Amino acid sequence: MRAQKKSAPNNERLAEIYRTAAQIILRKGYDATSVNDIANALGMTKAGLYHYINGKKELLFDIMNFGLWELDEEVAAPARAISDPAARLRFLVGAHARLVTRGQGAITILVDEVTALTPAQQRKITQRKRKYFDFLRGTLDELKAAGKMQDVHTTAAAFSLLGMINWLSRWFQQGGALDEEQAAEQIVRIALHGLLKPAKLKAVGSRQTAVGS
Amino acid sequence: MRAQKKSAPNNERLAEIYRTAAQIILRKGYDATSVNDIANALGMTKAGLYHYINGKKELLFDIMNFGLWELDEEVAAPARAISDPAARLRFLVGAHARLVTRGQGAITILVDEVTALTPAQQRKITQRKRKYFDFLRGTLDELKAAGKMQDVHTTAAAFSLLGMINWLSRWFQQGGALDEEQAAEQIVRIALHGLLKPAKLKAVGSRQTAVGS
DNA sequence: GTATAACTACCGACCGGCCGGTCGGTAAAA
DNA sequence: TTTTACCGACCGGCCGGTCGGTAGTTATAC
Protein backbone atom coordinates (compact mmCIF):
# COMPACT_ATOMS: atom_id res chain seq x y z
CA MET A 1 0.00 0.00 0.00
CA ARG A 2 1.22 3.41 -0.83
CA ALA A 3 1.14 6.24 1.53
CA GLN A 4 -2.06 7.87 0.54
CA LYS A 5 -2.53 10.19 3.41
CA LYS A 6 0.63 10.78 5.25
CA SER A 7 3.01 12.52 2.94
CA ALA A 8 1.94 12.70 -0.62
CA PRO A 9 4.12 13.95 -3.45
CA ASN A 10 1.71 16.79 -4.19
CA ASN A 11 2.85 18.21 -0.90
CA GLU A 12 3.59 21.67 -2.16
CA ARG A 13 0.13 22.52 -3.41
CA LEU A 14 -1.51 20.82 -0.47
CA ALA A 15 0.53 22.87 1.97
CA GLU A 16 -0.50 26.01 0.13
CA ILE A 17 -4.11 24.93 0.39
CA TYR A 18 -3.77 24.39 4.12
CA ARG A 19 -2.10 27.72 4.63
CA THR A 20 -4.65 29.64 2.59
CA ALA A 21 -7.60 27.85 4.13
CA ALA A 22 -6.20 28.40 7.61
CA GLN A 23 -5.92 32.13 7.07
CA ILE A 24 -9.47 32.47 5.82
CA ILE A 25 -10.93 30.27 8.52
CA LEU A 26 -8.96 32.13 11.13
CA ARG A 27 -10.42 35.41 9.92
CA LYS A 28 -14.02 34.42 9.29
CA GLY A 29 -14.52 31.34 11.38
CA TYR A 30 -15.06 27.79 10.17
CA ASP A 31 -18.82 27.87 9.69
CA ALA A 32 -18.83 31.23 8.02
CA THR A 33 -16.22 30.06 5.53
CA SER A 34 -17.58 28.18 2.54
CA VAL A 35 -15.59 25.72 0.52
CA ASN A 36 -16.12 28.13 -2.35
CA ASP A 37 -14.41 30.92 -0.41
CA ILE A 38 -11.34 28.77 0.01
CA ALA A 39 -11.34 27.60 -3.59
CA ASN A 40 -11.65 31.14 -4.94
CA ALA A 41 -8.83 32.35 -2.74
CA LEU A 42 -6.70 29.66 -4.34
CA GLY A 43 -7.84 30.61 -7.83
CA MET A 44 -9.78 27.43 -8.43
CA THR A 45 -13.33 26.20 -8.38
CA LYS A 46 -14.90 24.20 -5.61
CA ALA A 47 -14.84 21.04 -7.70
CA GLY A 48 -11.18 21.59 -8.37
CA LEU A 49 -10.44 21.94 -4.70
CA TYR A 50 -12.24 18.69 -4.00
CA HIS A 51 -9.53 17.02 -6.01
CA TYR A 52 -7.28 17.63 -3.02
CA ILE A 53 -9.55 17.39 -0.04
CA ASN A 54 -12.05 14.81 1.14
CA GLY A 55 -14.49 17.16 2.77
CA LYS A 56 -14.73 20.35 4.70
CA LYS A 57 -14.44 18.73 8.09
CA GLU A 58 -11.47 16.67 7.13
CA LEU A 59 -9.75 19.79 5.82
CA LEU A 60 -10.25 21.46 9.18
CA PHE A 61 -8.99 18.37 10.94
CA ASP A 62 -5.86 18.25 8.79
CA ILE A 63 -5.17 21.93 9.36
CA MET A 64 -5.47 21.50 13.09
CA ASN A 65 -3.10 18.59 13.06
CA PHE A 66 -0.69 20.63 11.00
CA GLY A 67 -0.92 23.45 13.53
CA LEU A 68 -0.32 21.10 16.41
CA TRP A 69 2.59 19.51 14.62
CA GLU A 70 4.10 22.95 14.16
CA LEU A 71 3.59 23.69 17.83
CA ASP A 72 5.37 20.51 18.76
CA GLU A 73 8.26 21.07 16.36
CA GLU A 74 8.93 24.66 17.18
CA VAL A 75 7.89 24.92 20.78
CA ALA A 76 7.42 21.72 22.71
CA ALA A 77 10.27 19.67 21.30
CA PRO A 78 13.00 22.28 21.82
CA ALA A 79 11.57 23.03 25.25
CA ARG A 80 11.90 19.42 26.30
CA ALA A 81 15.63 19.77 25.94
CA ILE A 82 15.79 22.52 28.54
CA SER A 83 16.26 21.10 31.99
CA ASP A 84 15.92 24.23 34.11
CA PRO A 85 12.19 24.73 34.55
CA ALA A 86 12.38 28.51 34.75
CA ALA A 87 14.33 28.72 31.51
CA ARG A 88 12.00 26.18 29.97
CA LEU A 89 8.94 28.18 30.92
CA ARG A 90 10.42 31.33 29.52
CA PHE A 91 11.17 29.57 26.28
CA LEU A 92 7.76 27.92 26.08
CA VAL A 93 5.87 31.17 26.47
CA GLY A 94 8.13 33.12 24.16
CA ALA A 95 8.30 30.56 21.40
CA HIS A 96 4.58 29.86 21.47
CA ALA A 97 3.80 33.57 21.39
CA ARG A 98 6.19 34.05 18.49
CA LEU A 99 4.51 31.23 16.62
CA VAL A 100 1.25 33.15 16.93
CA THR A 101 2.58 36.58 16.03
CA ARG A 102 4.42 35.24 13.04
CA GLY A 103 0.99 34.71 11.62
CA GLN A 104 1.59 31.64 9.60
CA GLY A 105 1.55 29.59 12.75
CA ALA A 106 -1.62 31.29 13.80
CA ILE A 107 -3.09 28.09 12.61
CA THR A 108 -2.91 26.93 16.16
CA ILE A 109 -5.84 29.12 16.97
CA LEU A 110 -8.02 26.98 14.82
CA VAL A 111 -8.00 24.59 17.68
CA ASP A 112 -10.90 26.69 18.93
CA GLU A 113 -13.14 25.34 16.22
CA VAL A 114 -12.90 21.89 17.65
CA THR A 115 -16.66 21.61 18.03
CA ALA A 116 -17.06 21.52 14.25
CA LEU A 117 -15.32 18.15 14.04
CA THR A 118 -16.77 14.69 14.32
CA PRO A 119 -16.52 13.18 17.81
CA ALA A 120 -13.70 10.88 16.73
CA GLN A 121 -11.69 13.76 15.26
CA GLN A 122 -12.46 15.83 18.33
CA ARG A 123 -11.04 13.18 20.58
CA LYS A 124 -7.78 13.06 18.70
CA ILE A 125 -7.29 16.81 18.66
CA THR A 126 -8.24 17.16 22.29
CA GLN A 127 -5.76 14.47 23.18
CA ARG A 128 -2.91 16.24 21.42
CA LYS A 129 -3.85 19.57 22.99
CA ARG A 130 -4.00 17.88 26.33
CA LYS A 131 -0.52 16.52 25.95
CA TYR A 132 0.86 19.99 25.33
CA PHE A 133 -1.13 21.42 28.19
CA ASP A 134 0.17 18.79 30.59
CA PHE A 135 3.71 19.56 29.55
CA LEU A 136 3.15 23.23 30.23
CA ARG A 137 1.51 22.64 33.58
CA GLY A 138 4.16 20.10 34.48
CA THR A 139 6.79 22.77 34.09
CA LEU A 140 4.84 24.98 36.45
CA ASP A 141 4.57 22.12 38.92
CA GLU A 142 8.34 21.69 38.84
CA LEU A 143 8.79 25.37 39.55
CA LYS A 144 6.34 25.21 42.38
CA ALA A 145 8.09 22.21 43.92
CA ALA A 146 11.33 24.17 43.73
CA GLY A 147 9.70 27.01 45.62
CA LYS A 148 10.19 29.39 42.75
CA MET A 149 6.59 30.08 42.00
CA GLN A 150 4.03 32.46 43.37
CA ASP A 151 1.13 31.00 45.26
CA VAL A 152 -1.12 30.24 42.31
CA HIS A 153 -2.97 27.18 41.06
CA THR A 154 -0.87 25.65 38.29
CA THR A 155 -3.84 24.60 36.20
CA ALA A 156 -5.34 28.08 36.30
CA ALA A 157 -1.90 29.49 35.54
CA ALA A 158 -1.37 27.25 32.53
CA PHE A 159 -4.75 28.17 31.09
CA SER A 160 -4.10 31.84 31.70
CA LEU A 161 -0.85 31.55 29.84
CA LEU A 162 -2.64 30.02 26.88
CA GLY A 163 -5.30 32.70 27.09
CA MET A 164 -2.77 35.49 26.84
CA ILE A 165 -0.91 33.80 24.03
CA ASN A 166 -3.92 32.82 21.98
CA TRP A 167 -5.45 36.26 22.40
CA LEU A 168 -2.43 37.68 20.66
CA SER A 169 -3.89 36.63 17.35
CA ARG A 170 -6.84 38.95 17.91
CA TRP A 171 -4.94 42.12 18.55
CA PHE A 172 -1.45 41.77 17.23
CA GLN A 173 -0.96 43.23 13.82
CA GLN A 174 2.02 43.51 11.58
CA GLY A 175 3.30 47.03 11.39
CA GLY A 176 1.83 48.06 14.72
CA ALA A 177 3.66 49.61 17.64
CA LEU A 178 5.23 46.27 18.51
CA ASP A 179 6.94 43.90 16.14
CA GLU A 180 6.68 40.13 16.42
CA GLU A 181 9.59 39.71 18.78
CA GLN A 182 8.64 42.61 20.99
CA ALA A 183 5.07 41.44 21.37
CA ALA A 184 6.23 37.96 22.35
CA GLU A 185 8.67 39.45 24.83
CA GLN A 186 5.90 41.50 26.41
CA ILE A 187 3.85 38.38 26.94
CA VAL A 188 6.81 36.68 28.58
CA ARG A 189 7.35 39.56 30.96
CA ILE A 190 3.73 39.90 31.94
CA ALA A 191 3.37 36.18 32.45
CA LEU A 192 6.50 35.75 34.51
CA HIS A 193 6.57 38.96 36.53
CA GLY A 194 3.04 40.32 36.46
CA LEU A 195 1.99 43.89 36.07
CA LEU A 196 2.76 45.39 39.43
CA LYS A 197 6.17 45.91 40.91
CA PRO A 198 6.72 43.57 43.82
CA ALA A 199 5.37 45.22 46.92
CA LYS A 200 7.89 47.55 48.47
CA LEU A 201 10.94 46.39 46.66
CA LYS A 202 12.83 48.51 44.28
CA ALA A 203 15.28 47.76 41.59
CA VAL A 204 16.42 44.23 41.94
CA GLY A 205 19.70 44.84 40.33
CA SER A 206 19.31 45.47 36.67
CA ARG A 207 16.85 47.65 34.93
CA GLN A 208 15.18 46.24 31.94
CA THR A 209 14.98 48.16 28.75
CA ALA A 210 11.75 49.62 27.66
CA VAL A 211 10.03 48.74 24.47
CA GLY A 212 7.82 51.69 24.15
CA SER A 213 4.98 53.61 25.63
CA MET B 1 -55.93 26.82 38.28
CA ARG B 2 -52.36 26.97 37.25
CA ALA B 3 -51.94 30.63 36.79
CA GLN B 4 -48.84 30.13 38.84
CA LYS B 5 -46.74 31.69 36.18
CA LYS B 6 -46.62 35.42 36.26
CA SER B 7 -47.95 36.92 33.17
CA ALA B 8 -44.85 37.69 31.26
CA PRO B 9 -45.02 40.96 29.49
CA ASN B 10 -42.98 41.52 26.45
CA ASN B 11 -39.78 42.37 28.24
CA GLU B 12 -39.67 39.29 30.37
CA ARG B 13 -39.95 36.95 27.44
CA LEU B 14 -37.49 38.97 25.41
CA ALA B 15 -34.91 38.74 28.17
CA GLU B 16 -35.43 34.99 28.27
CA ILE B 17 -34.92 34.84 24.54
CA TYR B 18 -31.67 36.78 24.81
CA ARG B 19 -30.40 34.60 27.62
CA THR B 20 -31.25 31.36 25.86
CA ALA B 21 -29.88 32.49 22.52
CA ALA B 22 -26.69 33.73 24.17
CA GLN B 23 -26.03 30.38 25.79
CA ILE B 24 -26.51 28.47 22.57
CA ILE B 25 -24.45 30.87 20.49
CA LEU B 26 -21.72 30.85 23.10
CA ARG B 27 -21.57 27.08 22.93
CA LYS B 28 -21.89 26.49 19.20
CA GLY B 29 -20.85 29.77 17.65
CA TYR B 30 -23.04 32.24 15.81
CA ASP B 31 -22.85 30.78 12.33
CA ALA B 32 -23.32 27.23 13.49
CA THR B 33 -26.44 28.23 15.38
CA SER B 34 -29.60 28.33 13.28
CA VAL B 35 -32.60 30.41 14.16
CA ASN B 36 -34.41 27.11 14.44
CA ASP B 37 -32.01 25.93 17.13
CA ILE B 38 -32.81 28.97 19.22
CA ALA B 39 -36.54 28.70 18.61
CA ASN B 40 -36.61 25.02 19.57
CA ALA B 41 -34.65 25.68 22.73
CA LEU B 42 -37.37 28.15 23.64
CA GLY B 43 -40.11 25.71 22.78
CA MET B 44 -41.37 27.62 19.79
CA THR B 45 -41.12 27.54 16.04
CA LYS B 46 -38.91 29.76 13.97
CA ALA B 47 -41.88 31.78 12.77
CA GLY B 48 -42.96 32.28 16.34
CA LEU B 49 -39.55 33.54 17.32
CA TYR B 50 -39.63 36.03 14.49
CA HIS B 51 -42.50 37.66 16.29
CA TYR B 52 -39.90 38.95 18.76
CA ILE B 53 -36.81 39.48 16.69
CA ASN B 54 -36.11 41.33 13.49
CA GLY B 55 -33.45 39.06 12.14
CA LYS B 56 -30.59 36.86 13.21
CA LYS B 57 -27.99 39.61 13.00
CA GLU B 58 -30.06 42.04 14.98
CA LEU B 59 -30.53 39.41 17.67
CA LEU B 60 -26.78 39.00 17.93
CA PHE B 61 -26.34 42.75 18.03
CA ASP B 62 -28.86 43.10 20.83
CA ILE B 63 -27.24 40.34 22.84
CA MET B 64 -23.84 41.96 22.48
CA ASN B 65 -25.17 45.27 23.65
CA PHE B 66 -26.77 43.56 26.60
CA GLY B 67 -23.44 41.93 27.47
CA LEU B 68 -21.61 45.23 27.20
CA TRP B 69 -24.23 46.93 29.31
CA GLU B 70 -23.71 44.29 31.97
CA LEU B 71 -19.97 44.80 31.82
CA ASP B 72 -20.42 48.49 32.32
CA GLU B 73 -22.88 48.12 35.17
CA GLU B 74 -21.01 45.52 37.13
CA VAL B 75 -17.42 46.26 36.33
CA ALA B 76 -16.62 49.59 34.73
CA ALA B 77 -19.04 51.82 36.63
CA PRO B 78 -18.06 50.64 40.12
CA ALA B 79 -14.41 50.76 39.11
CA ARG B 80 -14.71 54.39 38.10
CA ALA B 81 -15.45 55.20 41.71
CA ILE B 82 -12.11 53.83 42.89
CA SER B 83 -9.45 56.49 42.82
CA ASP B 84 -6.37 54.46 43.67
CA PRO B 85 -5.25 52.89 40.38
CA ALA B 86 -3.82 49.76 41.96
CA ALA B 87 -7.04 49.07 43.82
CA ARG B 88 -9.00 49.91 40.70
CA LEU B 89 -7.00 47.48 38.60
CA ARG B 90 -7.46 44.72 41.13
CA PHE B 91 -11.19 45.33 41.14
CA LEU B 92 -11.44 45.52 37.35
CA VAL B 93 -9.71 42.22 36.80
CA GLY B 94 -11.53 40.44 39.60
CA ALA B 95 -14.99 41.73 38.77
CA HIS B 96 -14.61 41.11 35.06
CA ALA B 97 -13.35 37.59 35.68
CA ARG B 98 -16.22 36.93 38.06
CA LEU B 99 -18.66 38.11 35.43
CA VAL B 100 -17.27 35.48 33.10
CA THR B 101 -17.16 32.62 35.57
CA ARG B 102 -20.64 33.32 36.79
CA GLY B 103 -21.66 32.13 33.38
CA GLN B 104 -24.67 34.25 32.76
CA GLY B 105 -22.41 37.17 32.01
CA ALA B 106 -20.43 34.98 29.68
CA ILE B 107 -22.46 36.81 27.14
CA THR B 108 -19.60 39.20 26.94
CA ILE B 109 -17.65 36.62 25.05
CA LEU B 110 -20.03 36.95 22.19
CA VAL B 111 -18.19 40.09 21.41
CA ASP B 112 -15.88 37.74 19.52
CA GLU B 113 -18.49 37.20 16.87
CA VAL B 114 -18.32 40.81 15.86
CA THR B 115 -17.49 39.93 12.26
CA ALA B 116 -20.97 38.51 11.77
CA LEU B 117 -22.53 41.95 12.14
CA THR B 118 -23.20 44.57 9.53
CA PRO B 119 -20.49 47.23 9.27
CA ALA B 120 -22.68 49.78 11.03
CA GLN B 121 -23.40 47.43 13.91
CA GLN B 122 -19.77 46.45 14.04
CA ARG B 123 -18.76 50.06 14.43
CA LYS B 124 -21.04 50.56 17.38
CA ILE B 125 -19.91 47.44 19.21
CA THR B 126 -16.27 48.13 18.51
CA GLN B 127 -16.70 51.63 19.84
CA ARG B 128 -18.16 50.40 23.11
CA LYS B 129 -15.47 47.77 23.48
CA ARG B 130 -12.88 50.41 22.76
CA LYS B 131 -14.19 52.62 25.51
CA TYR B 132 -13.79 49.83 28.04
CA PHE B 133 -10.36 48.96 26.75
CA ASP B 134 -9.21 52.56 27.02
CA PHE B 135 -10.43 52.71 30.58
CA LEU B 136 -8.47 49.59 31.42
CA ARG B 137 -5.32 50.77 29.71
CA GLY B 138 -5.72 54.19 31.25
CA THR B 139 -5.56 52.61 34.67
CA LEU B 140 -2.34 50.91 33.69
CA ASP B 141 -0.97 54.20 32.42
CA GLU B 142 -1.71 55.81 35.77
CA LEU B 143 0.12 53.04 37.54
CA LYS B 144 3.06 53.39 35.25
CA ALA B 145 3.21 57.13 35.79
CA ALA B 146 3.24 56.46 39.50
CA GLY B 147 6.18 54.13 39.05
CA LYS B 148 4.24 51.19 40.35
CA MET B 149 4.30 49.10 37.24
CA GLN B 150 6.72 46.67 35.74
CA ASP B 151 8.41 47.67 32.55
CA VAL B 152 5.74 46.47 30.14
CA HIS B 153 3.83 48.05 27.30
CA THR B 154 0.42 49.05 28.64
CA THR B 155 -1.45 48.21 25.46
CA ALA B 156 0.02 44.74 25.37
CA ALA B 157 -0.71 44.39 29.06
CA ALA B 158 -4.34 45.41 28.70
CA PHE B 159 -4.88 42.95 25.88
CA SER B 160 -3.17 40.21 27.83
CA LEU B 161 -5.48 40.87 30.72
CA LEU B 162 -8.49 40.53 28.45
CA GLY B 163 -7.02 37.38 26.97
CA MET B 164 -6.67 35.72 30.35
CA ILE B 165 -10.13 36.79 31.42
CA ASN B 166 -11.92 35.87 28.23
CA TRP B 167 -10.16 32.53 28.06
CA LEU B 168 -11.74 31.69 31.39
CA SER B 169 -14.97 30.90 29.60
CA ARG B 170 -13.26 28.10 27.71
CA TRP B 171 -11.84 26.21 30.63
CA PHE B 172 -13.70 27.21 33.74
CA GLN B 173 -16.47 24.84 34.70
CA GLN B 174 -18.87 24.80 37.55
CA GLY B 175 -18.04 22.09 40.02
CA GLY B 176 -14.40 21.93 39.03
CA ALA B 177 -11.42 22.24 41.33
CA LEU B 178 -11.92 25.98 41.61
CA ASP B 179 -15.16 27.76 42.32
CA GLU B 180 -16.14 31.04 40.70
CA GLU B 181 -14.50 33.25 43.28
CA GLN B 182 -11.33 31.22 43.49
CA ALA B 183 -10.88 31.18 39.73
CA ALA B 184 -11.30 34.95 39.57
CA GLU B 185 -8.81 35.37 42.41
CA GLN B 186 -6.28 33.24 40.58
CA ILE B 187 -6.54 35.46 37.54
CA VAL B 188 -6.00 38.52 39.70
CA ARG B 189 -2.89 37.08 41.29
CA ILE B 190 -1.36 35.94 38.04
CA ALA B 191 -2.09 39.23 36.36
CA LEU B 192 -0.77 41.40 39.14
CA HIS B 193 2.18 39.41 40.41
CA GLY B 194 3.07 37.01 37.61
CA LEU B 195 4.07 33.40 37.96
CA LEU B 196 7.60 33.61 39.26
CA LYS B 197 8.68 34.86 42.63
CA PRO B 198 10.51 38.14 42.30
CA ALA B 199 14.13 37.57 41.48
CA LYS B 200 16.43 36.93 44.38
CA LEU B 201 14.75 38.85 47.12
CA LYS B 202 12.25 37.43 49.43
CA ALA B 203 9.83 38.39 52.12
CA VAL B 204 9.23 42.03 52.51
CA GLY B 205 7.32 41.68 55.66
CA SER B 206 3.81 40.46 55.28
CA ARG B 207 2.11 43.22 53.42
CA GLN B 208 -0.83 41.57 51.85
CA THR B 209 -3.11 44.52 51.88
CA ALA B 210 -6.43 43.75 50.41
CA VAL B 211 -7.49 46.91 48.78
CA GLY B 212 -10.71 47.53 47.00
CA SER B 213 -13.84 45.62 47.69
C1' DG C 1 -73.40 41.64 30.33
C1' DT C 2 -72.34 40.74 26.26
C1' DA C 3 -70.86 41.85 21.41
C1' DT C 4 -67.00 42.97 19.04
C1' DA C 5 -62.95 45.16 17.80
C1' DA C 6 -58.06 45.18 18.58
C1' DC C 7 -54.08 43.14 19.96
C1' DT C 8 -50.73 39.50 21.41
C1' DA C 9 -48.40 35.32 20.84
C1' DC C 10 -47.71 32.20 18.34
C1' DC C 11 -47.77 28.34 13.99
C1' DG C 12 -47.65 25.69 9.16
C1' DA C 13 -46.34 26.19 4.80
C1' DC C 14 -43.62 28.09 1.82
C1' DC C 15 -39.58 30.66 -0.83
C1' DG C 16 -35.18 31.72 -3.06
C1' DG C 17 -30.51 30.98 -2.28
C1' DC C 18 -26.41 29.14 -0.88
C1' DC C 19 -24.22 25.14 1.09
C1' DG C 20 -21.33 20.80 0.94
C1' DG C 21 -20.63 17.45 -2.16
C1' DT C 22 -20.74 14.59 -6.82
C1' DC C 23 -19.93 13.40 -11.50
C1' DG C 24 -18.51 13.27 -16.07
C1' DG C 25 -15.66 15.42 -18.53
C1' DT C 26 -10.86 17.74 -20.59
C1' DA C 27 -6.34 19.07 -21.60
C1' DA C 28 -1.70 18.68 -20.62
C1' DA C 29 2.09 16.16 -18.65
C1' DA C 30 4.55 11.65 -17.84
C1' DT D 1 -1.88 5.25 -22.12
C1' DT D 2 -2.27 6.58 -17.80
C1' DT D 3 -2.14 10.04 -14.36
C1' DT D 4 -2.65 14.64 -12.66
C1' DA D 5 -4.95 18.82 -12.13
C1' DC D 6 -8.55 20.85 -12.73
C1' DC D 7 -13.75 22.61 -14.40
C1' DG D 8 -19.12 23.17 -15.48
C1' DA D 9 -23.25 21.61 -14.30
C1' DC D 10 -25.89 19.76 -11.20
C1' DC D 11 -28.21 17.87 -6.61
C1' DG D 12 -30.69 17.52 -2.21
C1' DG D 13 -30.98 19.95 1.92
C1' DC D 14 -30.97 23.39 5.17
C1' DC D 15 -30.75 28.31 5.87
C1' DG D 16 -32.77 32.97 7.01
C1' DG D 17 -36.85 35.04 6.31
C1' DT D 18 -42.06 35.86 4.94
C1' DC D 19 -46.95 35.41 5.02
C1' DG D 20 -51.49 34.32 6.05
C1' DG D 21 -53.56 32.49 9.35
C1' DT D 22 -55.68 31.45 14.53
C1' DA D 23 -56.60 30.89 19.38
C1' DG D 24 -56.67 33.44 23.43
C1' DT D 25 -56.73 37.82 25.93
C1' DT D 26 -57.96 42.28 26.95
C1' DA D 27 -60.40 47.17 25.70
C1' DT D 28 -64.12 49.49 24.42
C1' DA D 29 -69.23 50.32 23.28
C1' DC D 30 -73.73 49.85 24.30
Image: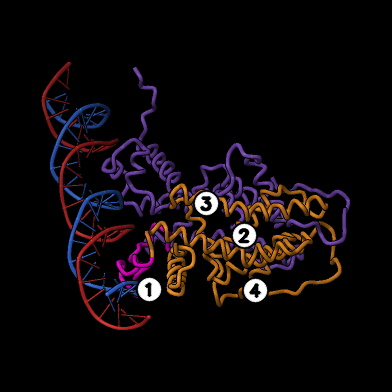
Chain colours: A orange, B purple, C red, D blue
B92 or A193: which is nearer to us?
A193
Q: Which residue is mark 1?
A: A42
Q: Which residue is mark 2?
A: A164
A103 or B207: which is nearer to us?
A103
Whole-number angstrom distance, CA of label 4 to CA of label 1: 30 Å
The part of the image, by quadrant, that contains residue B23 is top left
Q: Which mark is residue A175?
A: none
Whole-number angstrom distance, CA of label 1 to CA of label 3: 28 Å
Residue B5's spot in the image, x, y percent? 39, 26
Residue type, numbered disc 1: Leu
Whole-number angstrom distance, CA of label 2 to CA of label 3: 24 Å
Identify the magenta region: A28-52
Residue type, numbered disc 4: Glu
A146 or A6: which is nearer to us?
A6
Q: Contact (CB < 8 A) between labels 4 and 1? A: no
Q: Earlier in the sequence, mark 2 or mark 3?
A: 3
Residue B114's spot in the image, x, y percent? 44, 59
Whole-number angstrom distance, CA of label 1 to CA of label 2: 32 Å
Asked if the magenta segment contains residue A136, the reply would be no
Q: Contact (CB < 8 A) between labels 2 and 3? A: no
> Does label 2 lie on the same chain as label 4?
yes
